[in-house]
Image (cartoon, rainbow, N blue to C red):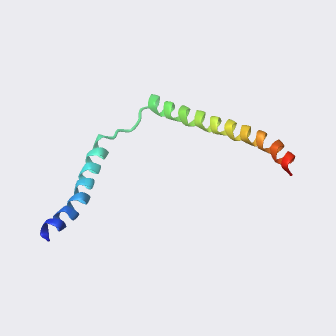
Amino acid sequence: MADGFGKLTEAPVDFVKEGIVFVKKCTKPDKKEYLKIIQAVGIGFIMMGVVGYGVKLIHIPIRALIV
């Protein structure tokens, strides 16, 4: 019975320890890395906008034909 309780409390303790190690390894991005992230996010926004516009452009005529 005590062994089961030990296993139950072991997982959260290991999770917290691993989380602390992960946070200690993290560093703030420098200017070059930050600009790369901004560029990637911007390109993603533009691509999603183009895809959404394309879908809407195709969807409207098809919907007009059906209705």
Residue sitting at x 18%, y 68%: 5
Which residue occupies the foreground of this view, 17 or 67? 67
Which residue occupies the foreground of this view, 50 or 39? 50
Q: Is residue 38 left or right of residue 23?
A: right
Total number of numbered labels? 0
Which residue occupies the foreground of this view, 16 or 5? 5
Residue sitting at x 67%, y 37%: 51
Image quadrant where one finds the N terminus: bottom left
Residue 7's place in the image compared with 23, above or below, is below
Residue sitting at x 46%, y 28%: 32
Residue furthest left in the image: 2
Q: Is residue 46 left or right of residue 25?
A: right
Which residue occupies the foreground of this view, 45 or 61? 61
Residue sitting at x 59%, y 33%: 43
Q: Is residue 24 left or right of residue 35?
A: left
Residue furthest bottom in the image: 1
Name which quarter of the figure residue 46 lies in: top right
Residue 54's place in the image compared with 18, above or below, is above
